[in-house]
Amino acid sequence: MAESAGCVVKKTELSGKTVQELRALAKAAGLKNYSALKKTRLVDLLAASGSGNARSKAPARRTGKPAGAKKKPPGATKARATKASGKPARATKARRKPDSERAGGLDSHVGRGLSPRTRRAFSIYSTPGEQRIKASKYHLGVQEAPDIDDGFMFPETHGEDLIALMVRDPYWLFAYWEFSPDLNDQLLNRLGEETLRNSRLVLRVYDVTGVDAENPVGYHDIDIAPGARDWYINVTHVESDYCIDIGLILPDGSFLVIARSNRVSLPPIGPSAEVDEQWVTLESLGEIYSLTERGPTSGSGGWGSGGWGQG
């Protein structure tokens, strides 16, 4: 009964204080979750805790340790502290696993030939044996670099005097040629230095529609620069057949052939009038192949790769 009376007296004393004063008492008493309570609840909380006596001294600041906790001995080890708290004293850095372990146990000699992405893909298999079976078809082994001759150079010519002719479109032809390295010496011995120096290197374009190159419908000459290796040619007659000689026009007007090209036919202008489907058979391909002419042929004489007139 006396205890009850003391509680009533204490509540009576607390009820005479303001909310701010009650919260200050609760804070000094180390209570929690009091900031949102109303005055009546604060009075009940302080009375129940026995800390609401205004005449009592404010409790000491909480240190986070029990009142009867013993002070840690100076010589206590980390292992003892770990055992008492249940947590490790300091987190240790995780050991980095090798690639074979991170990929699920792939053998090092197998994993060396695979990319990291492929190794991760095989980590879904539970045992290294399964991984070796699945990854074996991707293992390329040790790749040896081929021996490369750094001093290799492609030859300027193939040692022949030749010219080739191709069709670009219904209005243009394209020709390219090459000469043997000893052509210049041959021409010097045959014509002499003065005659060779006064000669012109030309492309003679023949219209051979319905005839051969020995009896052309007509021709025209194109002067080319010494050292040139190819030329675009604008035709004079469309839908016709052409071939070309490359050679020298000598000072007396005669023409010395160095090489003769293959024969080509210009395609018609515009779309074809044939719309019916025609399927090519193996027999017809054989006939077409048998009717095609030979490739570029060499003519008489020749021309040096460095340009004529250079001994």
Image (spheres, rainbow, N blue to C red):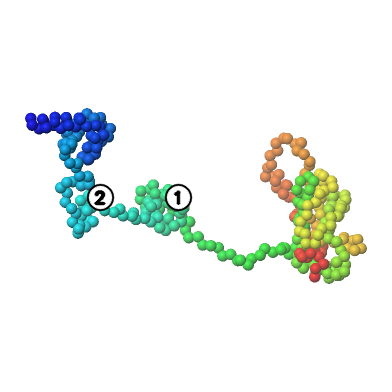
Q: Is residue 162 among the parts visible in the rendering?
A: no
Identity of the residue drawn at 39% across and 52% down: 103
In which quadrant of the rendered view does residue 58 lie? Answer: top left
Identity of the residue drawn at 15% across and 47% down: 68
Measure the alpha-carbon separation of dots 1 and 2: 37 Å
- Residue 310 pos. (x, y %): 80, 68
Q: Which residue is mark 2?
A: 87
In which quadrant of the rendered view does residue 269 lie? Answer: top right
Q: Is residue 206 among the parts visible in the rendering?
A: yes
Q: Which one is in front, 137 or 274?
A: 137
Q: Which one is in front, 73 or 14?
A: 14
Q: Which one is in front, 67 or 194?
A: 67
Q: Which amino acid, by three-letter code, is at mark 1?
A: Arg
Q: Nearer the viewer, mark 1 or mark 2?
A: 2
In which quadrant of the rendered view does residue 251 lie? Answer: bottom right
When the figure is inspected, residue 261 is found, relative to residue 43, above or below; the finding is below
Quarter of the N terminus within the rendering: top left
- Residue 61 pos. (x, y %): 22, 45
- Residue 199 pos. (x, y %): 86, 63
Q: Which residue is mark 1?
A: 117
Identity of the residue drawn at 84% across and 57% down: 223
